[in-house]
Amino acid sequence: MNIVVRAYTESDVPRMTEIWNEVVRDGIAFPQTECLDLESGQTFFDSQTHCGVAEDTDSRELLGLYILHPNNVGRCGHICNASYAVSAEARGKHIGEKLVRDCLAQGRTHGFRILQFNAVVRTNTAARRLYEKLGFVQLGVIPQGFLMKDGHYEDICPYYHML
């Protein structure tokens, strides 16, 4: 497997939408409850500052993606936010790390100074370990800030990284 992270193209949108929806349906990491269709997926991905995709250049399969956009406006517009999605069959293969590293570089390239995650679910230990390995700092805990798919509330942990 030879993974490269590159900017997405319009032809990537169907697979990006599938991977995104897989995480939404899992109901344990993304705040969204509604899945994207091809039209809303195209609009959603086009509206981001940058979208990166992880592609296996041997098989030409997309295995993951990220979105990067401002976290706020005006005086806080220098802070960006991102979300990452890796297909279930590709998890545990360090694709998420490649996506996060590329996202950090793209954040700097696009003039952001800080990358902030507003709502990392406390039980998402793989993501939290990765973020901490890459130098993200946890800001605290918001008790019961995330409604899990099974109906219980879980804590969320905001993180930030200086770019």
Image: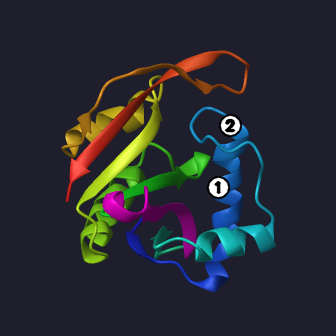
Q: Secondary structure at mark 2?
A: helix
Q: Nearer the viewer, residue 115 or 149?
A: 115
Hey, which quadrant is residue 81 in on the image? Answer: bottom left
Taking the image as shown, residue 108 lies to the left or right of residue 94, namely left
Could you tell me which quadrant the N terminus lies in?
bottom left
Q: Which residues are magenta?
A: 60-77
Q: Position of residue 135 (x, y in %)?
A: 18, 44
Q: Residues within 10 Å of mark 2 (few under 14, many from 20)?
A: few
Q: Amino acid at mark 2?
A: Asp
Q: Residue furthest bottom?
A: 10
Rendered position, 110 above or below 117: below
Residue under the point 70% across and 75% down: 42
Whether residue 67 can be seen here: yes
Which residue matches tag 1?
20
Q: Position of residue 46 (x, y in %)?
A: 60, 77
**What mark, if any, has residue 26 been given in the picture?**
2
